[in-house]
Amino acid sequence: MESDRAISDTLMDVQARIAAACAKAGRKPDEVEIIGVTKTHGPDVVREAWEAGIRLFGENKVQEAAWKIPESISGPSWHLIGHLQRNKVRPALELFSVIHSVDSVPLLERLERIADECGHRPEILLEVNVSGESSKEGLKPEQVPEAIEYALQCRSLTLTGLMTMAPFCPDPELARPVFAQLRTYRDRWEQEFAIGLPNLSMGMSNDYEVAVEEGATWVRLGTVLFGHRPAWRPQREDTERWEP
Ligand SMILES: *Cc1c(COP(=O)(O)O)cnc(C)c1O
């Protein structure tokens, strides 16, 4: 079911909440950018969100993005936020300028090789499984230093930060330690490697205010902006060409 409210109205509420969370944490609201997560929605929603002022968009499946992005207005910066299978690296690099979900050294190797081959210069984040849930994707914290080391010697990839998913729970306060922990790791690794990792991609519709209080710079928002997602995803036959 689509939300009945205009995206521009909803966006104003969300921005006010982000500003309040920033004020509470002594941050400036312009330190936080919204990524509009348009998965399951069509190019019409991308357009309305763009007209409302959203500039960054997130998709979690390469195959869905492969038909949607070419059919959407040009201008948005597209971010891949879902797990990236190694056989989808090539189309992912064609479609996305930022990849949040880098979760292994072999994936880094492949991204670097194909980005180099095709002249892409993506920005990447390492996805960290802070909470240690076995069902979650992402690097275990102890695996991250090796991945940072690898990423730093890639000439086509620019590592700019970290991403995490908090375990879903109705009470957003329960996600706070996860977000705080990601920031603590970030500070530690910035020191350890003498690098900047300015981007913290954390917080979704149900917990973004807490994430902002804990230092998020990118919040990934779907439901709160665009309403509940339909159970099915629009797909197109011609995405077959992206298959391995
Ligand atoms: C779907 C998705 C989101 C947005 O979820 P909402 O709860 O609808 O805001 C954020 N991040 C990732 C990785 C997602 O897959």
Image (spheres, helix red, strand yellow):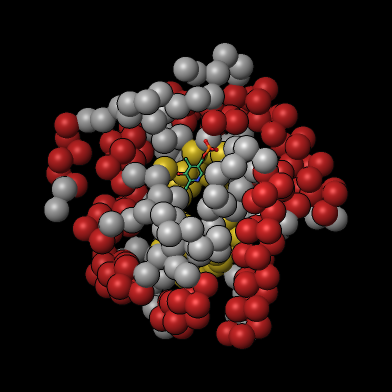
Q: Is residue 90 left or right of residue 174?
A: left
Q: Is residue 122 left or right of residue 112?
A: right
Q: Quadrant of residue 19?
A: top right
Residue 42 showing in the rendered view: no
Q: Quadrant of residue 182?
A: bottom right
Which of 24/64 is in front?
24
Query: Where in the figure is residue 53, as x and y percent of width and height?
Result: 61, 34
Which of 204/167 is in front?
167
Residue at x 33%, y 41% (from the top left corner): 65
Residue at x 34%, y 35% (from the top left corner): 68
Query: Where in the figure is residue 90, as x and y percent of width and height?
Result: 25, 58
Residue found at the very far top of the displayed protein: 4
**Numbered disc total:** 0
Q: In this rendering, is residue 104 above or below 83?
A: below
Q: Is residue 176 left or right of residue 149?
A: right
Residue at x 44%, y 50% (from the top left corner): 81
Query: Where in the figure is residue 139, as x and y percent of width and height?
Result: 45, 68
Which of 197/75 is in front?
197
Q: In this rendering, is residue 121 above or below 40?
A: below
Q: Is residue 38 left or right of residue 208?
A: left
Q: In this rendering, is residue 99 above or below 52?
A: below
Residue at x 55%, y 60% (from the top left corner): 131
Q: In this rendering, is residue 142 above or below 77?
A: below
Residue 171 showing in the rendered view: yes
Query: Where in the figure is residue 3, as x and y percent of width and height?
Result: 55, 18
Q: Quadrant of residue 191?
A: bottom right
